[in-house]
Structures are given as C-alpha cells and as structure tokens.
Image (cartoon, rainbow, N blue to C red):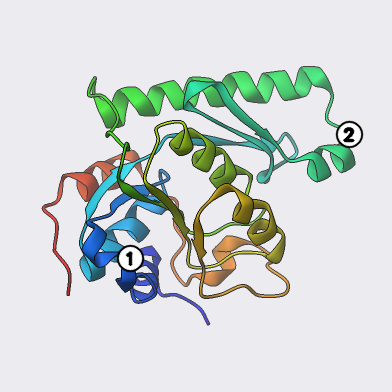
C-alpha cells in the first residue's frame, strides 16, 4: 500500500472514520504534513479543520528521528529509547529545544495571526498527522489537547510503526490507523508524493472553504 499524496491518504482514512460523522468532529492537523490529511478526511466525514501546534525535536545528526516533542502549555514528551542510544549531550538537547520553541512561536504567529486556538471543551477532537514513526509528536499533541477537556479524543493517521502505536494508544480514546507495517523505514516511504509543504500551502488549505462530506 502506497498513498499518492497526503490529500488522497486523508480521503482513504476518512473511510475508517465515518462513525464520527454525526459528532461534527474538530479535525486538528499537525502542521505541516497533517493539514492536507485532515482536509481529505473532512471531505469524507465533514467537520471543521484547524491546527494543533507541536514540534518534533530531531536528533542533531539525524533530524528526522524524534528524540522528543514539545507543544503549547509547556508539554515536553521525551523519546527515552532514542535518547539512550543517541549520546546527545544536555547542551545539544537544549540547543535543539530552543530552536524548536522558536519555530513553534513563529508558526503560532503565522497560522493563528493573533486568534486564539479553537475551543476543544466538550468536542469530539481528531488529531491528524501524515504518519507516526516514533509517536512522540502525536503523544505531545494528545497531551496538549487533553488539557483543553475534549469530550472524546481520537488520533487518526494513514500509516504508523508498531512502536508508535504502542506509545500513542494510552494517550487517546481511539487510535485509527489502517496501515501498520512490521518495519516502517520512514513515513515518507508510504507516499508517492511526500514533498515538504510550505507555509503558503498550509495557509491555502486552511483558508479554502470546506468541501463537505461525500
């Protein structure tokens, strides 16, 4: 199974989420890659698309591998297994954390433009990403969302490693992932088109009128 692109993956994933249609879900894409997936889901089941701001802390010499993740409200989720093997010093960790906190603030200013985050209280909230390798970023997102008291918290991703499924399951009320290969070399391998989205692409997706459920 390989998805053509993130939007197509979202449409496919939406077929596994039709039980949420009546709940008018709030679909929170993790920028950048989770946003087109969330838009694809919304085309199938409806719901409002927004973003939840979190940042992966990648290893200094292997930035695609998460050693931790951070989110609004001071949430920091450590990937202990990766840290134990990496040999990253406290100073190196602090340098990466400072850079990612700065990027989190930049994205907040860009994507929120001064507006408050959506109210999650009492809502069915679906956290969406384009895939999970370690699960650290999505786990951080779950903790940020939990603090805002949703009625139900769901995670939906098109592809995941078994390790990430194990990590994220305790953080959410429901985890939906149709493809969990035994060996996930990287999330990008699940897509024909896995280009790095620009800020402009994300803003365009968020500004587009909702297509509505199919």
Q: Quadrant of residue 10?
A: bottom left
Residue 12 in sight here: yes
Residue 184 placed where, x, y %? 68, 68
Q: Is residue 155 above or below residue 102?
A: below
Q: Judging from the image, what secondary structure is the residue with disc 1 in?
A: helix
The residue under the point 84% across, 24% down is 89
Q: Quadrant of the C terminus?
A: bottom left
Residue wearing tag 1? 7
Q: Residue furthest left?
A: 209
Residue at the spot x=33%, y=57% of the render?
A: 38
Task: Identify the residue position indicated by label 2 in the image.
Answer: 87
Residue 80 as seen in the image, left or right of residue 76: right
Can residue 128 be seen in the rendering of this structure?
Answer: no
Q: CA distance from mark 1 to mark 2?
A: 37 Å
* Residue at 66%, 75% in the rendered image: 181
Identify the image quadrant of residue 160: bottom right
Image coordinates of residue 122 in percent, x first then y, are: 31, 41
69 up-or-down from 17: above or below: above
Q: Position of residue 40 (x, y in %)?
A: 29, 64
Residue nearer the viewer, 111 or 178: 178
* Mark 1: few/some/many CA within 10 Å (<14, 14-19, 20+): many
In the image, is residue 190 above or below residue 93? below
Q: Position of residue 85 (x, y in %)?
A: 88, 43
Is disc 2 surrounded by few (<14), some (14 to 19) or many (20+) residues within 10 Å?
few
Is 121 on the left-hand or right-hand side of 68?
Answer: left
Residue ranking furthest to the bottom: 1
């Amino acid at each position: 199974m390989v998805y053509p692109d993130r939007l197509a993956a979202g449409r496919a994933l939406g077929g596994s989420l039709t039980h949420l249609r009546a709940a008018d879900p709030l679909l929170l894409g993790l920028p950048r890659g989770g946003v087109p997936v969330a838009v694809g889901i919304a085309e199938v089941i409806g719901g409002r698309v927004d973003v939840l701001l979190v940042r992966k802390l990648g290893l200094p010499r292997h930035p695609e591998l998460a050693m931790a993740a951070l989110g609004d409200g001071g949430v920091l989720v450590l990937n202990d297994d990766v840290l134990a093997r990496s040999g990253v010093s406290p100073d190196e960790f602090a340098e990466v954390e400072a850079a990612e906190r700065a990027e989190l603030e930049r994205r907040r200013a860009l994507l929120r433009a001064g507006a408050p985050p959506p109210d999650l209280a009492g809502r069915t909230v679906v956290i969406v990403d384009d895939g999970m390798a370690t699960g650290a970023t999505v786990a951080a997102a779950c903790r940020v969302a939990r603090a805002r008291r949703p009625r139900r918290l769901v995670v939906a991703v098109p592809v995941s490693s078994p390790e990430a499924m194990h990590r994220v399951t305790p953080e959410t009320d429901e985890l939906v992932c149709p493809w969990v290969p035994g060996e996930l070399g990287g999330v990008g391998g699940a897509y024909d088109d896995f280009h790095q989205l620009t800020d402009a692409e994300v803003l365009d997706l968020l500004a587009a009128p909702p297509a509505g459920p199919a």
